[in-house]
Image: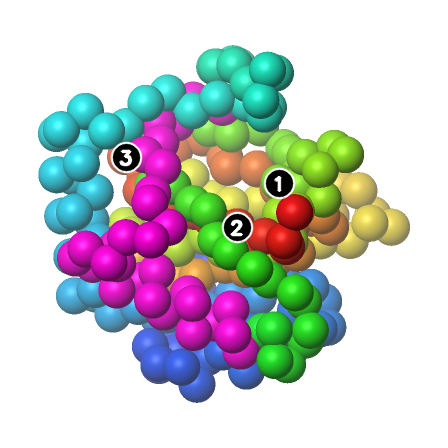
């Protein structure tokens, strides 16, 4: 099933209960139009400014002493965010995520405690191989949230998010185009996923709600 063409939803807090319902059911949610085009433009401008300042670095794989840049696994560049930031469009988006966190804790009792995240730039020709967001032996990342910031994304641009949604069928997947304003959320420990090769620059804001350590 390809979900690139679903109609856009209203960009307001009314999306929160729908996200909660989807997480309680299949465990993943797609919300088109979570942010408006103007909000996406503001986030993209802030990301571009950070890039000009040299804030983006090659993304690593693994954690702690095992963290290393492995370009055969992933080839994006990332800028980690200050979770306490209140500056500009990034601060406004993090405030929206805080509202989402409170809704999900109230409705689903997920115990989401804090958020960590980064901006990610995928240059043309880049990708991220199939992986799971929750580190082995460290079960803190609970919910993955991916927001796309790409205007006028076309099928030829590639860069689809491929989510493997059925544990009984390891090769079954759903695909999501990284269209600006789209928010994808899913349970971090359940779904392997990958970023298919992009043919134009692809920008996202990816993060994880974590349980208390």
**Dot 3: what SS?**
loop
Q: Of marks 2 and 1, which one's residue comes earlier in the chain? A: 1
Q: Does 91 lie within the magenta span?
A: yes
Residue at point 58%, 45% (across, down)? 162
Element marked by disc 1: loop
Residue 109 screen position, x and y as percent:
69, 73
- Which x, y percent locates residue 61? 55, 23
Q: What stretch is highlighted in magenta?
A: 74-103
Please determine whether, in this image, residue 146 is positioned above or below residue 100.
Answer: above
Do the residues bearing badges 2 and 1 touch, measured as CB atoms within 8 Å? yes
What mark, if any, has residue 201 been given in the picture?
3
The tag earlier along the polypeptide, 3 or 2, is 3
Q: Name the residue under label 2.
A: 208
Mark 1 neighbour density, 10 Å: few (under 14) some (14–19) many (20 or more): many
- Confirm whether residue 152 shows in the render: no
Spot occupied by residue 146 in the image (x, y as percentages of width and height)? 45, 52
């Amino acid at each position: 099933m390809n979900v690139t063409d679903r109609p856009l939803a209203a960009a307001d807090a009314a999306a929160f209960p729908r996200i909660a319902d989807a997480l309680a059911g299949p465990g993943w949610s797609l919300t088109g139009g979570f942010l408006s085009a103007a909000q996406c433009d503001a986030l993209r401008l802030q990301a571009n400014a950070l890039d000009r300042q040299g804030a983006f670095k090659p993304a690593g794989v693994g954690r702690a002493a095992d963290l290393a840049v492995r370009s055969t696994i992933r080839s994006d560049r990332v800028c980690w965010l200050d979770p306490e930031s209140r500056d500009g469009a990034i601060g406004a988006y993090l405030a929206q995520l805080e509202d989402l966190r409170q809704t999900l804790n109230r409705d689903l009792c997920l115990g989401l405690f804090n958020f960590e995240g980064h901006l990610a730039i995928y240059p043309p020709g880049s990708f991220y191989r199939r992986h799971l967001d929750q580190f082995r032996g460290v079960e803190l990342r609970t919910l993955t949230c991916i927001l796309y910031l790409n205007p006028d994304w076309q099928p030829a641009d590639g860069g689809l998010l491929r989510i493997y949604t059925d544990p009984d069928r390891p090769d079954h997947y759903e695909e999501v185009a990284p269209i600006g304003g789209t928010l994808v959320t899913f349970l971090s420990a359940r779904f392997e996923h990958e970023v298919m090769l992009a043919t134009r620059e692809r920008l996202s804001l990816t993060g994880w709600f974590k349980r208390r350590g």
